[in-house]
Amino acid sequence: SDLKNADLRNLAELGQGNGGSVMKVEHVPSGTVMAKKIVLIDAKPSVRKQILRELQIMHSCKSPYIVSSYGAFLAEPNICICMEFMDKGSFDGIYKKVGAIDIEVVRQVAYSVLEGLMYLYDVHRIIHRDIKPSNILCNSQGEIKLCDFGVSGELINSIAHTFVGTSIYMSPERIQGAEYSVKSDVWSLGISLIELALGRFPFSDASSDDEDNDSDLEGTEDLKKTATNRNSLAVKMGEKTARRHSRRKSKGVSLHGGGMTMSIIELMHQIVKEPAPRLGPEGKFAKEAEEFVDACLLKDPEERKTPRELLAYVWMDQAQKSTFDLKEWTSTF
Ligand code: ATP
Ligand code: MG
């Protein structure tokens, strides 16, 4: 593609993640507003070229459930990826703004994510690898789309070397070192759906009152060391996060604020050892919703359902037949 930085005018910063930042930009020659993701990568020129080649696959991803791509280019030492601008942002931002999300909206999110996963896997043999509310975007047309999927193995490697690891949405089998599968994405979807419906991250620390809990002595450095084996415990500890943590006097890692303090090691332990979280409290949500989320969060990946199987659930049938007006909903915030 002939996209280049000189043709892009910065309009606003949309957000920062562990791997870089995202800017709202205008492509001046065409007048198109885009989202430009800037990723700092630590890789040789040959690897950078390989990454760019791999990112071309994004260009051929065409689905109503996938954020479309305008192209990618090198702007040393970064790689820039230009994509469709989604004007209502990501679902983490939305629930932090409006609070717990209406279960009917959550159901449409589930449906869109499954359709997106099915498309990526069936058509391109791509596993997303990073399903979470910040990678599920929404626009004022009422469309819900996935972004930041793992198109480029080399990019994943390069970012992993720089920033290490992956996230708190990770499935029990991934924490224990298994390879990614589309079922790992299904687990992450289940966690994300509970998070949206509750308006907070679903794992909590039973001993959170104990400020000086010494059960975890891992500081950031130790976490990084532990996480260098990417196939075993991998902890997403990007620079931004690490800085935030080092400012805290508590030894635990604070997840999503709100006074909840829990180390990432403790969280990983809880995911592996404890029963999976459920959509609740009991009786608050329809049985169909509970049944669906339970099927996403079966701890054994063999038992856990595939996106295709999940689309056959009653709740997804209701999603398909729904007349819920998402466009109208997006006009409320
Ligand atoms: P992490 O780095 O842990 O994956 P993240 O997904 O929040 O976290 P980024 O992918 O860098 O980090 O995205 C930063 C923010 O930019 C997102 O939270 C989202 O709100 C916003 N954003 C990303 N892509 C777009 C887009 N295409 N349109 C509108 N906003 C976007
Ligand atoms: Mg993202």
Image (tube, rainbow, N blue to C red):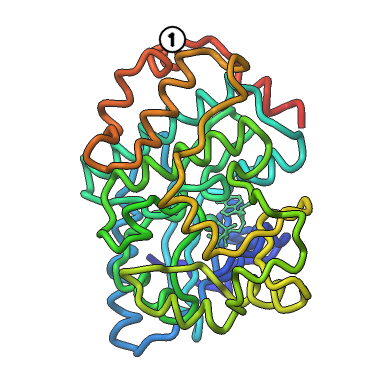
For the view shown, which residue lies furthest in the bottom direction?
44
Q: Nearer the viewer, residue 124 or 239?
A: 239
Crowding at label 1, few (<14), some or many (≥20) Cα neighbours within 10 Å? few
Give the amino acid at mark 1: Lys
Residue of label 1: 321
Considering only vertical position in the picture, is 16 above or below 63? below
Residue sitting at x 31%, y 73%: 154
Image spot of residue 275 (x, y percent): 45, 40
Q: Nearer the viewer, residue 273 or 113?
A: 273
Q: Relative to 63, is 140 on the left or the right? A: right
Residue sitting at x 57%, y 13%: 324
Q: Disc 1, ligand 1: is the CB inside 8 Å?
A: no
Q: Relative to 78, is 284 on the left or the right? A: right
Q: Secondary structure at mark 1?
A: helix
Determine the image quadrant of residue 329: top right
Q: Relative to 44, is 109 on the left or the right? A: right
Residue sitting at x 47%, y 58%: 269
Q: Nearer the viewer, residue 31 or 151?
A: 151
Q: Quadrant of ligand 1?
A: bottom right
Considering only vertical position in the picture, is 106 above or below 129? above
Quarter of the image that includes the C terminus:
top right
Considering only vertical position in the picture, is 62 above or below 25? above
Considering only vertical position in the picture, is 306 above or below 45? above
Image spot of residue 184 (x, y percent): 34, 48
Image spot of residue 118 (x, y percent): 29, 36
Residue sitting at x 59%, y 39%: 195
Determine the image quadrant of residue 281: top right
Quarter of the image that includes the N terminus:
bottom left
Count of residue discs: 1
Image spot of residue 242 (x, y percent): 64, 76
